[in-house]
Amino acid sequence: MRFPPIHPRRSSSLKRYLLPALLSLLSLYLLFPSHPPSPSPPRSHPRQMTTPPAAALATGVHPIDTLIRTAESTFLSTLASESPSLSAAASTYRRRRGRHPPPGFDTWYRFATSHDAVMVEEYFDQIYHDLEPFWGVEPGRIRADASGFEMRIRVRDGKAEAESNWPWTRIWLGLVGSLEGMLPDVDLAVNAMDEPRVVVGWEEMEGLVEVARTRGRVDGGGGVKGVEGRFGKWKGEKGKERQGVRWEDEKQYWKIARRGCPPDSPARQAEVVRDFDRTPYIVPGFGLEHMWDGYVANYTLSTDFCHQPDLQGLNGIFVEPLSTSSTSTLFPLFGGSKLSVNNDILLPAPVYWSEEERFMGTDDDAALPWDQKYDMAIWRGVATGGRNKRDNWKAFQRHRFVAMNNSTKLMSAEEGMETPVNFMLPSHKYRLGAQENGELGEWVESWSDVSFTDLMCDEKVNERQLTCDYTSPHFALGRSITMAEQFQYKYLPDIDGNSFSGRYLGFLRSTSLPIKATLWKEWHDSRLTPWKHFVPMDNRYGDWYGIMEYFLGYGDDPGRNGIAERIAMAGREWASKVLRREDMQIYVLRLLLEYARVSDDRRESMGWVEDLL
């Protein structure tokens, strides 16, 4: 165990509260559900759930122990579905997708297996979630939209070129270009903004998906002799962006985003918040649908805000993003991340493909042995999340997380001397030993090193200004640190910025433990199992202290250092198998084969059926 000189761990003779089974059942029942959540997954995204057994509460074990065991079982079950051959992969595809694989599927399979890919069909679910609605749109309209967009990548005769010099476009061009010789003709419209841009109304999306279910199905008749196994030329080079596509610039993104939720959802039903210059409303009860006994059990559902209307005042994207340009028309726009309701098509983010050292670190730094790390949590970052202003900063997620790790603020709140302005003290239902002994602030100070490096003020006098009068009284700046320095700490909380966190892949590849809270979907989500490869956290961060007490312990409880190390190493090992640059290539090749088919006028008769002939 290693400690930094500035924050040595303090020992305490105070005993941590030991959870009596029967009494805890009674107290926890009042706040947390007495059985794991089993909601129907939202139509808007694929499912990723850890479901603990209902009898777990009666055993007296810590709920995280149960979630970890269940995650292990879920992971092994998924891995058992790996396809051992091309014909098996095609058969699995037909069962899961209801269509024949696209033309070029054999080329894709050989490319994937030549790079030792893990051939689990479920790991490509995001592609079908993204593209399925486009089966409800005429192919010519898809091509016209893509070919008429300013920021685009053009593939002809297997070669790729960019119609823009924007840095992200050039990086994506490098990714697409690495697949030259295997690509069909396509035009990719790409999003240059941090924020996603397509949110089709839930009612319209339901109609598109319903139409899609009738098109190109294996059970549609006609056998396999009439199936076309080759792509044609892309028609639409001179097409223009479809008339009628309106780009909205509404600053409060919540008003745009919630139309993607079901009409009877809390997000659609709740009143829109307009005043953010106050302590935000934090309602833990809205998280019960994805929580179990106080911790995240359904990670995918935790990233969906449709059942969590209080998040409109707890995340900068909903308050005032840096930029907004959205449409309610289904448009084939590719990007690196999105919310659960967005209809953008996901690619691996540019920072992942480029492997910038400031986001990823180096292999040597990431490999630091666990027992040589500080037994602490570290977070450094800029006060991003949107345009934080004098009258709205209290609603921003990074400001909330940093404040929750401010020991001085915690001590003042515990003593009743000060009311937190942008967070709430943890619920007593967590039975935190430090809180019960009035030592929450002191305890957090012993293991947390969290601070901003730039307050990103809206009212800057010049670009060098790092502080501002409206947030400086609440936040002291810390020094910037490299990824190499962050890897010297065992626990790495990962908090959303303007969109997804570009450090996540670097964290996963390291020997430290990522603790992830996010609203953002990425290409790799179905490849990772929460509680097996990383620790999930609710977007209110109310479980943060409970998570850390579980791993670090308190008083006479030594914590669970070995379990933390095991998850960290499992995540690192798995990332080296399914989150490599080769895996990004494999994912994108499969994505573009599917995109080319859905954009082709002959799509309903196209497929790969050589295994059936």
Image (cartoon, rainbow, N blue to C red):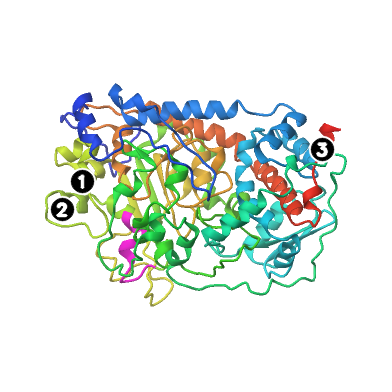
Which residue is found at the position 49% from the left and 31% from the top?
569
Residue 437 in the image: x percent, y percent?
14, 38
Q: Residue flagged by tag 2: what amino acid is it?
A: Ser
Residue 81 in the image: x percent, y percent?
62, 28
Q: Which residue is mark 3?
A: 609
Crowd class of label 1 (few under 14; some 14 to 19; many from 20; radius 10 Å): many
Tag 2–tag 1 contact (CB < 8 Å)? yes
Residue 229 in the image: x percent, y percent?
85, 45
Q: Which residue is mark 2?
A: 412
Q: Which residue is mark 1?
A: 441
Taking the image as drawn, is residue 354 in sight?
no
Q: Residue flagged by tag 3: what amino acid is it?
A: Val
Q: Tell which circle, 3 or 1, labels the residue nearer the N-terminal end.
A: 1
Q: Residue flagged by tag 1: what amino acid is it?
A: Gly
Looking at the rendered structure, the secondary structure element under dot 2 is helix
The alpha-carbon separation of the residues under discs 2 and 1 comes to: 8 Å
Residue 605 sits above or below residue 252 on the image: above
- Tell me if residue 394 is in the magenta stretch: yes
Query: 373 or 286, which is in the foreground?
Result: 286
The alpha-carbon separation of the residues under discs 3 and 1 comes to: 63 Å
Quarter of the image that includes the C terminus: top right
* Location of residue 204 (image quadrant): bottom right
